[in-house]
């Protein structure tokens, strides 16, 4: 990264909007830095647009792309208003990832996640494109001595007078760079959109089908060493001693180093011993010969199968933190009045993200600066690692960002950044840290196991009068936001998804929904769809139980308890209709329905299960989505498909277990994930939603799948399954 | 030291023990990084290459076992990167993160090599050893059918 340029960016664009100040490099600065472009050869009106005199257009996408299509969708938002083709212009990551404009508007860190990239950046990116366009138009109008309003733009050119005048954006750079910011910038009416709402392809497919696309794993640098780590097998254990003699005999193994743990830093790394070698194969052989003596750990007795009992006990523990997430009326007063009272407990296990590209990151510490190469989803964490481990300040941190081979939450962890920063500082040459699949499985960043207890009261008409829910889980954000629980409401919004006022669908008169904090001391982490998964599984399964107890149709029962939720009602009704809900079904076939809302989007899922020759299988998934404006409809469809597949995984496979403080699973033979043969036909309908606002979709698709399948299995077999993975061999 | 033939090119005296997995020879000795590492146990298919036209998992194949055979990687599937599967993959916009797609395409190419009928069943059988975590199975199915149809017309 060009530091002179970064400094100037910082000093000039003072407002975090990234739109405030026209930017160009003054000759004096350009003159002092041979790498800086000459004054008028480049037009950078804001944090997202770079136009060069040769006509090159570069759009900055400040969000990590882990396959979610942000490079296409976000570029399209800028390109639409700038009037360039988002599929053919260059897309780059920020030259300075810590420029204020790139900070997450809600979390206040430099990060990608929470299905927010399109929904929260949409307006700003369009404005960035429109502002640049207005300046280019003004520059052309000045040159032609005409009014800007009489000019138009198309495909990177400003036009006037029926094509009599035409200038490429690159030809306008010199003038546009010196113009004052326009006072008023108008955005396109959605009916004029050429790209937004119409994209069916993503930018980089061609490079990804011929092996040319460069991932973190593919990086090669002179003198680079590959590091493979022997991390603590029992969470919390420390390195007492290690014997590296045999490991160092392996050809290619260069060094063996202990890495100190950083328990003082939230989300910091545990202790480990690193084998540094010329390549992965040498490092792997060396690691196998490494002998490490580990200390005892207070968690050496930890067993995940004991968690549900401990979590249940927390509900009755007056010392446990209990935070109401949605309250109305008085549920306790309703219990004695109920015609029927139902109670049920729901359990979900630890789940591991398992992106197909295991964590891989390269760092080089030299001359008091650190350079990163790889899929850095959270630049703030790379900065923290540099500062904490290497004492390197922000202006000496460079990130060469790469698209990653999936994340699903895994790349929001920090341990690997801390580990590689330490190694890079110790050895002084570039270090590429690689996880094996086993390392990935045992990263102790799994989706936490959860326990839910529900109680519901039905009246004589089969209506739900009171509902109580206790959602027991550890806290997520404290790892990331020290002091989180010092806030007045103590609310952990990442554990109460789908059970708060804005995203809980049902409104009986009496409600008591609460999160109960239970910490096992085993670290856990972020995971695609976060607490929507267990909360929706519990609520949507229990609504089904209530409907059956009330003798009512599960769809009608849901609709009867929703008020003022037209988008929610619409997806439910349409999904039901598409799946043939209420129509006669062949023998041995059953449907189950479930729904969730999140990221200002809505989805309903209908699962169809069938019993054939004794075996039960999921025969089809049908879903209807309302995500408002789908900026990239092809991208929305594939995100939903992926989400449904993840939901199928939760329903049938995902389960990480621990015994004696150690993870039992190690690779895809004992931790199953969905294969093509597991995936049923899928019917996805994305509604034409409200055109002014896109909602999030990356994490929308999965939560309703497990309860929809569980509900279908109940209809088929009469057996209610309240823990995942579901058992397809259970019969009534 | 070992001699192997990859994508029609003979590489002599490659610095590798015969027990070194082919995947790491390809990636770290020949710098053909299109074949990916996902599990190291032959369970995910990200490293799929062809040995004499048949799909094998390069992470499980000692390079010694590949001596004397024709090895084809994603880089050598088509000299112009226009194999019908590659064109179909782009047309259907299959890749999300893309990390598994080299292996997916090599497995699909091996299926087409057999000359077997391309049906949902044969696709499922050929492709279920290749994991995708993003969720591209539906589009992979479409792309293979598209490529099979294009090959027939050609």
Image (cartoon, coloured by chain):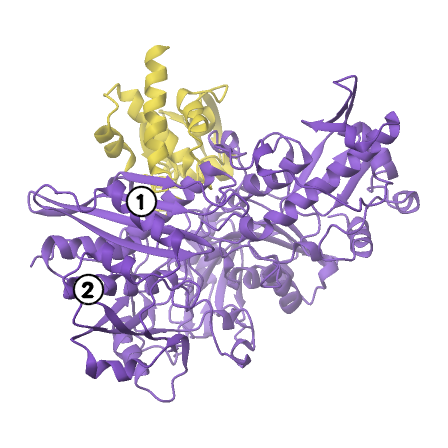
Which chain does the yellow colour mark? B
Image location (x, y in percent) of residue A150: 78, 28
Which residue lies most toward the top here? Answer: B154
Residue depicted at x 55% and y 41%: A73
According to the picture, the residue beneath numbered tag 1 turns out to be A574
Residue depicted at x 20% and y 83%: A336
Which chain does the purple colour mark? A
In the picture, the disc for residue A545 is 2
Q: Please tell me whether residue A524 is drawn above or below residue A339 in the rendered image.
A: above
Query: Which of the 4 image quarters holds residue B83?
Result: top left
Quarter of the picture holding the C terminus of chain A:
bottom left
Residue A670 in view (yes/no): no
Label 1, label 2: how far apart the Cα atoms are = 22 Å
Say left or right for A324 vs A618: right
Residue A370 in view (yes/no): yes
- Asked if the residues shown at circle 1 and circle 2 are in contact, with their CB atoms under 8 angstroms apart, the answer is no
Which comes before the other along the chain, label 1 or label 2?
2
Residue depicted at x 26% and y 48%: A606
Which residue lies most toward the bottom here? Answer: A318
Query: 10 Å neighbourhood of mark 1: few (<14), some, or many (≥20)?
Result: many
Chain for disc number 2: A
Image location (x, y in percent) of residue A311: 31, 77
Image location (x, y in percent) of residue A731: 8, 57
Image location (x, y in percent) of residue A400: 64, 47
Q: How many marks overall?
A: 2
Q: Please tell me whether residue A719 is drawn above or below residue B78 in the rendered image.
A: below
Chain for disc number 1: A
């Amino acid at each position: 990264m060009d530091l002179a340029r970064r400094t100037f960016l910082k000093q000039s664009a003072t407002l975090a909007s990234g739109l405030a100040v026209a930017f160009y490099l003054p000759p004096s600065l350009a003159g002092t830095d041979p790498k800086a472009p000459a004054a008028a050869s480049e037009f950078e009106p804001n944090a997202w647009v770079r136009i060069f005199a040769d006509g090159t257009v570069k759009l900055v996408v400040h969000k990590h792309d882990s396959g979610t299509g942000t490079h296409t969708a976000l570029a399209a938002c800028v390109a639409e208003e700038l009037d360039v083709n988002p599929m053919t212009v260059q897309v780059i990551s920020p030259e300075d990832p810590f420029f204020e404009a790139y900070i997450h508007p809600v979390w206040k860190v430099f990060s990608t996640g929470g299905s927010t990239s399109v929904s929260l950046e949409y307006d700003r990116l369009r404005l960035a494109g429109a502002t640049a366009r207005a300046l280019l138009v003004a520059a052309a109008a000045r040159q032609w001595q005409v009014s800007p309003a009489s000019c138009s733009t198309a495909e990177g050119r400003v036009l006037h007078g029926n094509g009599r005048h035409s200038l490429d954006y690159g030809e306008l750079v010199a003038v546009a760079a010196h113009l004052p910011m326009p006072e008023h910038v108008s955005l396109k009416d959605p009916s004029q959109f050429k790209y937004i709402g119409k994209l069916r392809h993503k930018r980089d497919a061609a490079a990804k089908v011929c092996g040319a696309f460069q991932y973190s794993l593919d990086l090669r640098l002179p003198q680079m060493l590959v590091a493979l780590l022997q991390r603590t097998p029992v969470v919390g254990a420390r390195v007492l001693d290690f014997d590296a003699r045999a490991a160092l005999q392996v050809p290619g193994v260069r060094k063996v180093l202990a890495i100190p743990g950083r328990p003082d830093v939230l989300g910091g790394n545990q202790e480990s011993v690193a084998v540094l070698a010329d390549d992965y194969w040498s490092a792997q052989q060396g690691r196998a010969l490494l002998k490490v003596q580990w200390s005892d750990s207070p968690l050496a007795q930890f067993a995940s199968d004991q968690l549900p009992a401990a979590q249940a006990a927390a509900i009755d523990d007056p010392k446990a933190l209990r935070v109401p997430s949605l309250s109305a009326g008085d549920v306790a007063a309703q219990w004695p009045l109920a015609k029927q009272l139902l109670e049920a407990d729901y359990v979900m296990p630890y789940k591991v993200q398992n992106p197909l590209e295991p964590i891989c990151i390269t760092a080089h510490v030299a001359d008091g600066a650190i350079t990163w190469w790889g899929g850095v989803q959270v630049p703030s964490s790379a900065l923290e690692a540099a500062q904490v481990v290497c004492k390197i300040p922000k202006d000496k941190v460079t990130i060469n960002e790469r698209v990653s081979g999936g994340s699903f939450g895994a790349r929001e962890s920090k341990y690997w950044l801390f580990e590689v920063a330490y190694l890079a500082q110790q050895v002084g040459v570039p270090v590429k840290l690689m996880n094996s699949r086993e390392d990935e499985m045992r990263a102790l960043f799994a989706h936490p196991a959860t326990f839910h207890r529900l109680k519901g009261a039905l009246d004589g008409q089969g209506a739900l009068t009171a509902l109580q829910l206790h959602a027991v889980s550890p806290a997520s954000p404290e790892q990331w936001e020290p002091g989180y629980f010092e806030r007045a409401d103590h609310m952990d919004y990442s554990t109460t998804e789908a059970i708060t006022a804005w995203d809980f669908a049902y409104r009986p008169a009496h409600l008591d929904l609460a999160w109960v904090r239970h910490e096992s001391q085993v670290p856990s982490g972020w995971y695609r769809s976060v607490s929507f998964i267990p909360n929706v599984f519990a609520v949507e399964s229990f609504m089904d139980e209530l409907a059956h107890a009330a003798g009512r149709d599960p769809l009608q029962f849901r609709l009867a308890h929703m008020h003022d939720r037209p988008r929610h009602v619409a997806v439910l009704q349409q999904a039901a209709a598409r799946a043939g809900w209420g129509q006669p079904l062949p023998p041995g076939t059953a449907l189950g329905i479930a729904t969730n809302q999140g990221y200002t989007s809505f989805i309903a899922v209908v699962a169809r299960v069938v019993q054939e020759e004794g075996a039960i299988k999921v025969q089809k998934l049908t879903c209807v989505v309302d995500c408002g404006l789908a900026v990239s409809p092809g991208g929305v469809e594939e995100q939903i498909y992926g989400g449904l597949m993840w939901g199928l995984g939760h329903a049938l496979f995902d389960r990480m277990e621990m015994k004696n403080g150690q993870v039992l699973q190690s690779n895809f033979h004992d931790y199953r994930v969905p294969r093509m043969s597991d995936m049923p036909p899928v019917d996805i309908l994305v509604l034409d939603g409200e055109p002014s606002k896109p909602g999030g979709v990356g994490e929308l698709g999965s939560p309703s799948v497990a309860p929809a399948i569980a509900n279908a299995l109940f209809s088929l077999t009469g057996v209610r399954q309240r823990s995942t993975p579901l058992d397809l061999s259970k019969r009534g | 030291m070992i001699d192997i033939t990859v994508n029609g090119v003979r590489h002599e005296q490659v610095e590798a023990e015969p027990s070194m997995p082919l995947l790491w020879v390809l990636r770290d000795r020949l710098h053909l990084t299109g074949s990916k590492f996902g599990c190291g146990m032959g369970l995910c298919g990200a490293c799929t290459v062809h040995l004499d036209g048949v799909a094998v998992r390069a992470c499980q194949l000692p390079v010694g076992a590949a001596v004397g055979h024709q090895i084809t990687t994603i880089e050598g599937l088509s000299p112009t990167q226009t194999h019908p599967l590659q064109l179909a993959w782009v047309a259907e916009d299959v890749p999300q993160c893309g990390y598994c797609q080299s292996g997916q395409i090599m497995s699909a190419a091996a299926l087409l090599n057999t000359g077997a009928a391309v049906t949902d069943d044969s696709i499922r059988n050929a492709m279920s050893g290749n994991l995708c975590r993003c969720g591209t199975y539906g589009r992979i199915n479409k792309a293979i059918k598209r490529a099979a149809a294009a090959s027939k017309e050609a």
